[in-house]
Image (cartoon, helix red, strand yellow):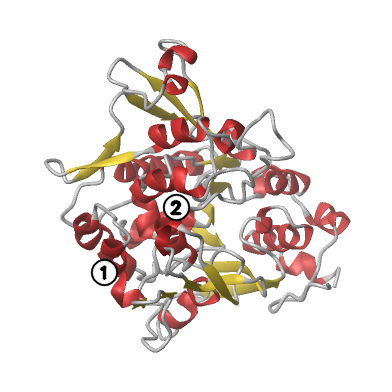
Amino acid sequence: MTRIVTMMALALSTATMLSTCRSASNLHPVILVPGNGGNQLEARLNREYNPSSLWCSRFLYGRDDWFRLWFDPTVVLDPFTRCFNDRMMLFYDRDLDDYRNAPGVLTRVLDFGSTKSMLYLNPYLKKLASYMSPLVKALEKVGYINDKNIVGAPYDFRYGLAAEGHPSKIGSQFLQDLKDLIEKTSRENDEKPVILISHSLGGLFVLQLLNRNPNSWRDKYIKHFIALAAPWGGTIEQMKTFASGNTLGLPLANPLLVRPSQRSSESNQWLLPSPKIFHDLTNPLVVTPRTNYTAYDMVRFLEDIGFDNVGPYKTRVLPLTEELRAPHVPVTCMYGRNVDTPEVLVYGEGGFDEQPEIVYGDGDGTVNLASLSALETIWVHDKDQSLKTVQINDVSHTSILKDDVAIEEIVKEILNVNSMESELKEYV
């Protein structure tokens, strides 16, 4: 099917892009912020680790060796799925009012400040686990230089942020590290303000960073914010993840085996549908033989599926879903649509341990259109906020980083931000 771009339908060929590119010194640096699961994680097990089975013993990985936690293809096979679940788990510490790793599990993010851990989620499975590589290669073709004026901000995507008055040690440290990286990257590129490019969950972190810093800092360091497939109001699919588990497209994985770790993820709670966006009380998001649930019923839904941390969700996470203030820097939202996206989950008598029947609606296959387009309504009356929207038909949540048409649109927008509009016009 021919894809129709609903805004600025100018299509640039690779040759055109090459002919319009400038030297790297004339380009605003780009910082890439990945989405949920969008960079590699490593783990190490110490003596406190209590494996759920012999298969999960730390001795199989070496006593003190770091090993790949995400993405490891063995996750699709039980009993390794159980091991993966054990190590990805987060636990809420009531005394600290914060989240932490499972006992005996140490984790680390690789290569902060570089794109290295984001190009491929597993460097030995490049075809299967490609992530930011197509976008980086496309930017290199128009004059950017990887790890010079294209840098990356990987993070431990299991952790989120918390509402004011609550600590979030890991998430807050990431925001500080990202702020430092922005300043450093600007200094190393002739004091040019940076272009922030996020995918999915990364957009929520970036918006929080911008709104937690003063106008003077944003004016100095931020040229533009390009949000790709951002779930501003969460996703209905996330309710399925919490209720029944989500294999993330891995065909052999058992969703119930990874459900505990997915429920424990602080950032997954942040992605539950927000009543700020999903505010229609007449159309439930989840239907069961006894009870229907809208976004306003999220606490009851979590209680009914047996979720343990409803209290922290209410106090730490739910208020965050209301924080979609305009940052007063130029923003471009780019997302796919016309892809079947879960809109209503219908459960039978078997309950939440069974996968639901799904009624589909519009979106990018993961994020609903209402969430993808939310800022267009929320910021519509803010005259100080520049907002541009680029919709791309038939491009999914993940393929926006791989599809040729989508990559072309992203690069085109970056070239526009670099004040190349006048140069581009001669090629139209």
Residue lying at 69% horizontally and 65% vertically, measured from the top left: 395
- In which quadrant is the C terminus drawn? bottom right
| Residue that badge 1 annotates | 300
- In which quadrant is the N terminus drawn? bottom right
In x, y percent, where is residue 413? 66, 63
Residue closer to the observer: 168 or 114: 168
Residue lying at 44% horizontally and 67% vertically, measured from the top left: 232
Q: Nearer the viewer, mark 1 or mark 2?
A: 1
Looking at the image, the residue that sits furthest to the bottom is 282
- Residue type at mark 1? Arg
**How far apart are the alpha carbons under marks 1 and 2?**
43 Å
Residue closer to the observer: 348 or 208: 348
Q: Is residue 140 left or right of residue 33?
A: right
| Of pointers 1 and 2, the one earlier in the residue sequence | 2
Residue closer to the observer: 329 or 230: 230
In x, y percent, where is residue 93? 19, 41
- Secondary structure type for disc 1: helix
| Residue that badge 2 annotates | 221
Looking at the image, the residue that sits furthest to the front is 349
- Residue type at mark 2? Tyr
- Which numbered tag is attached to residue 160? none
Q: Is residue 65 above or below residue 211?
A: above
Q: Is residue 244 left or right of residue 150?
A: left
Residue lying at 49% horizontally and 40% vertically, measured from the top left: 154
In x, y percent, where is residue 143? 74, 45
Q: Is residue 93 left or right of residue 202?
A: left
Counting labels gives 2
Q: Is residue 265 above or below residue 145?
A: below
In x, y percent, where is residue 29? 58, 47
Residue closer to the observer: 331 or 366: 366
Whether residue 218 can be seen here = no
